[in-house]
């Protein structure tokens, strides 16, 4: 299973790790994914979803239904 947020589509970021001697090596900055069981009020059911912590914070402010609707995500298929 790939490390992708099911709501926002956030993926890993390519970057460089720079040492004290300025030697650069490639590294991946992975998304902070959490597996959560969230209540979806409009659908009147629980939804199991892999989601980033940033999206969880936004869901706390807006709510799951309105946030998914603003992203164009159908929660029935998730």
Image (cartoon, rainbow, N blue to C red):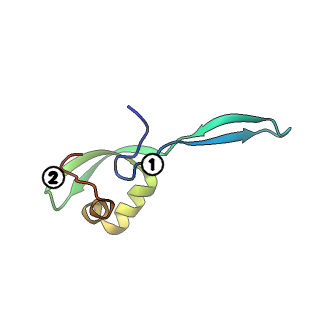
**At 39% from the left edge and 63% from the top edge, which residue is drawn?**
58
Mark 2 sits on what residue?
45
Above or below: residue 26 compared with residue 75? above
Residue 60 at x, y = what percent? 36, 63
Question: Residue 6, image x and y in percent?
Answer: 34, 46
Res 17 quadrant in image: top right
Above or below — where is 34 with respect to 23? below
> Which of the two discs, 1 and 2, sits closer to the camera?
1
Residue at label 1? Answer: 10
14, above or below 66, in the image: above
Rendered position, 25 above or below 71: above
Distance CA(mark 1)–CA(mark 2): 25 Å
Residue closest to the far bottom: 62
Q: Residue at x 52, y 42 (%)?
A: 12
**Residue shown at 35%/61% (left/top)?**
59
Q: Residue 46, image x and y in percent?
A: 20, 50
């Amino acid at each position: 299973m790939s490390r992708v947020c099911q709501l926002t589509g956030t993926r890993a970021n390519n970057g460089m790790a720079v040492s004290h001697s300025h030697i650069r090596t490639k590294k991946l900055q992975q998304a902070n994914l959490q597996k959560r069981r969230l209540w979806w009020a409009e659908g009147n059911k629980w939804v199991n979803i892999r989601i980033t912590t940033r999206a969880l914070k936004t869901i706390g402010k807006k709510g799951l239904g309105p946030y998914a609707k603003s992203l164009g995500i159908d929660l029935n298929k998730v």
